[in-house]
């Protein structure tokens, strides 16, 4: 998606608004730095043409001290610009980072299906750092350089207009070359930034999966995969630096020509008597005041390209459509827990239809189990219920207590649904922090009670730091069963009316499964429950079982009724227990 430059600039400038006063002071200091920079050539001219020839020794000393005093003032001005300018940039970066993170929290599941974590992290960190540098240096460089170019040009005109115009005639050539190579640089640095994001994504994936890598002794494979991304980054960097080398070498050559022109033309003018030696010397000094800011603007182009590229990538995510409630959406209150899937069909983007006209009804407090081969659509039904993925118009309805969830606020729906999954996600922090995630305002007594009901309290109090024990990244210091019980405690604390169990025990050993199942059975009491089960023995007591195959409901009924029907369910059940017998 290409955002127009004017719109991009307007959105960038908007982040300056909270810092208007500080920015104004920063730019004023930058302006004073530019003006004081013009004092030296003026004094030099007076020295060479008046003070020295007339032996005005006292005036020479006073003029020198005045220049020194101005340079002391310039010292403090530069300190102000460097410090407070960077503070403005960092605060803008912080605001963008917070805006980006907050926006990421609003994006639907489909966004995360299509974007790798490492690439998202790159946009939050390194991309926004480049934006911060542009936010700080951009206004200052533009102001200081522009003022210096104008003032030095006017002053050069007062020395010798013809010589000044000869020098200025080279500027259009410099501008043309800069614009030409800038386009190439922009494209090359965009490619380089994308390659860098791929490297971060590869690192994030490999580090997260390091235990799997070691278990399968596939370190060399991971190194090879990383090398591919790294090679792509190196190639992109070569292209970027080749473009940058052309840019800088070409522009530097033109500025070098400036000096050659001054040397020849100025020498001829001096020989011809058009200017005196003092003016000639002053002109040489003053031309550097003209050329240096031109070079500053040229060198600034690299930073500009990096900053603009980073801000574009920031805007790309900010322009992603967040989850939005319908205009007429109302909160779900006084939840009874009746659920109905009415003629539901669904397909993920760029894929075939996963669900085909599914009809299911779960009465208040009942337990419905979904069974069937992998890929049949069971987990999709679980994701549709909390509105993680939204149904298109004409694709059926999902009702809670007779109300279409598309006309309910997402937050209120999700607050009333508790989810326990096979792949438990725990946050870095303490055991208490992770249980409290179920309800952040819960008391200590409520946390302990939830842990007891999940059969994890006794283990927690046996630890040296109890509920303050740090569990490591994603709960790496805990066993699978302990992590699962923590997630169950979290749901106990949330106390929802509706419960979704998505293969919550399938990754556990038989002994642990029995303990977890006891906690889950207690959790299900009085709640409407939707269960996705791999082990059919765990759902024999379900009020109803639905066999899902190829996105369709093939069979429905109690365990006993389905066994008597001698259909798909009986085959699945018999096969599973025959396999268990063989294993035993």
Image: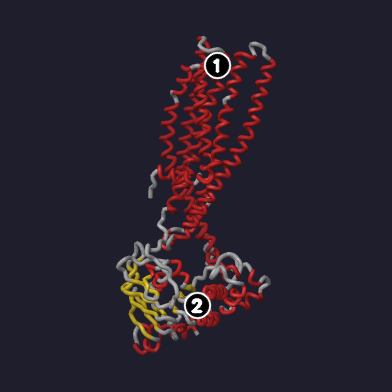
State whether residue 533 appears in this view. no
Image spot of residue 551 (x, y percent): 34, 73
Residue sitting at x 51%, y 55%: 121
Q: Give how far across and how far down residue 474 sits, in percent.
A: 55, 66
**Rendered view: 160 above or below 443:** above
Residue closer to the observer: 372 or 427:
427
Find out whether the residues at labels 2 and 1 contact each other: C-beta distance under 8 Å.
Answer: no
Q: Which mark is residue 280?
A: 1
* Near-viewer residue (146 or 126): 146
Tag 2 residue? 505
Q: Mark 2 or mark 1, which has the lower sequence index?
A: 1
Mark 2 to mark 1 CA distance (whole Å)? 88 Å
Which mark lies nearer to you, 2 or 1?
1
Please state the horizontal and vertical placement of residue 541, each as a whole percent of the image: 45, 86
The residue drawn where x is 54% and y is 40% is 23
Residue at point 34%, 82% (across, down): 555
| Left or right position of 466 against 424 | right
Q: Secondary structure at mark 2?
A: loop
Q: Is residue 111 left or right of residue 516?
A: left
Q: Farthest residue in the top direction?
A: 273
> Image quarter for residue 448?
bottom right
Residue at position x 34%, y 68% from top? 346
Residue 314 image point, x, y percent: 46, 50
Circle 1 residues within 10 Å: few <14, some 14–19, many ≥20: many
Judged from this view, the residue extending furthest toward the left is 394
Q: Nearer the viewer, residue 228 or 267?
A: 267
Q: Is residue 396 visible?
A: yes
């Amino acid at each position: 998606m290409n955002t127009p430059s004017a719109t991009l600039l307007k959105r960038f400038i908007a982040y300056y608004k909270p810092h208007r006063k500080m920015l104004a002071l920063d730019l004023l200091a930058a302006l004073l730095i530019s003006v004081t920079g013009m004092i030296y050539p003026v004094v030099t001219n007076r020295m060479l043409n008046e003070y020295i020839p007339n032996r005005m020794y006292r005036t020479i000393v006073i003029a020198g001290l005045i220049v020194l005093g101005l340079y002391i003032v310039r010292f403090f001005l530069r300190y102000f610009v460097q410090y407070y300018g960077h503070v403005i940039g960092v605060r803008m970066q912080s605001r963008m980072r917070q805006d980006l993170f907050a926006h990421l929290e609003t994006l639907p599941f489909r966004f995360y299906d299509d974007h790798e974590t490492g690439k998202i992290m790159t946009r939050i960190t390194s991309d926004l750092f480049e934006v911060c540098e542009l936010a700080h240096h951009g206004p200052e460089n533009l102001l200081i350089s522009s003022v210096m170019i104008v003032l030095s040009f006017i002053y050069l005109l007062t020395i010798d207009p013809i010589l000044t115009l000869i020098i200025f005639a080279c500027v259009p050539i410099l501008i043309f070359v800069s614009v030409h190579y800038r386009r190439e640089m922009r494209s090359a640095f965009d490619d380089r930034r994308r390659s860098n994001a791929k490297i971060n994504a590869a690192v994030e994936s490999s580090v997260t999966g390091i235990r799997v890598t070691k278990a399968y002794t596939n370190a060399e494979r991971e190194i090879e995969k990383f090398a591919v991304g790294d090679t792509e980054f190196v190639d992109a960097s070569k292209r970027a630096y080749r473009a940058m080398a052309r840019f800088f070498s070409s522009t530097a050559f033109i500025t070098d020509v400036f000096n050659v022109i001054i040397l020849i033309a100025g020498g001829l003018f001096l020989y011809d008597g058009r200017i005196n030696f003092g003016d000639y010397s002053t002109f040489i000094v003053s031309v550097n005041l003209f050329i240096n800011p031109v070079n500053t603007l040229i060198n600034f182009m690299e930073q500009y390209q990096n900053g603009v590229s980073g801000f574009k990538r920031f805007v790309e995510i900010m322009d992603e459509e967040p989850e939005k409630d319908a205009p007429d959406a109302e909160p779900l209150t006084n939840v009874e827990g009746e659920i109905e899937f009415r003629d539901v069909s669904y397909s993920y983007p760029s894929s075939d239809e996963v669900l085909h006209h599914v009809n299911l009804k779960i009465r208040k407090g009942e337990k419905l189990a979904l069974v069937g081969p992998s890929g049949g659509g069971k987990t999709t039904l679980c994701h549709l219920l909390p509105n993680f993925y939204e149904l298109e118009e004409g694709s059926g309805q999902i009702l809670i207590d007779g109300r279409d969830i598309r006309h309910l606020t997402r937050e209120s729906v999700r607050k009333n649904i508790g989810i326990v999954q096979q792949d438990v996600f725990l946050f870095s922090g303490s055991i208490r922090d992770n249980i409290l995630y179920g309800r952040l305002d819960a008391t200590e007594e409520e946390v302990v009670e939830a842990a007891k009901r999940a059969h994890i309290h006794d283990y927690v109090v046996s630890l040296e730091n109890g509920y303050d024990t740090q569990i490591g990244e994603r709960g790496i210091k805990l066993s699978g069963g302990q992590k699962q019980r923590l997630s169950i405690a979290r749901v106990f604390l949330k106390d929802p009316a509706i419960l979704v169990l998505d293969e919550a025990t399938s990754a556990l050993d038989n002994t642990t499964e029995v303990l977890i199942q006891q906690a889950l059975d207690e959790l299900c009491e009085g709640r409407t429950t939707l269960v996705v089960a791999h082990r059919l023995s765990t759902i024999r007591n379900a009020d109803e079982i639905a066999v899902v195959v190829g996105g369709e409901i093939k069979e429905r009924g109690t365990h006993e009724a389905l066994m008597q029907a001698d259909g798909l369910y009986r085959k699945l059940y018999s096969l599973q227990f025959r396999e268990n017998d063989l294993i035993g």
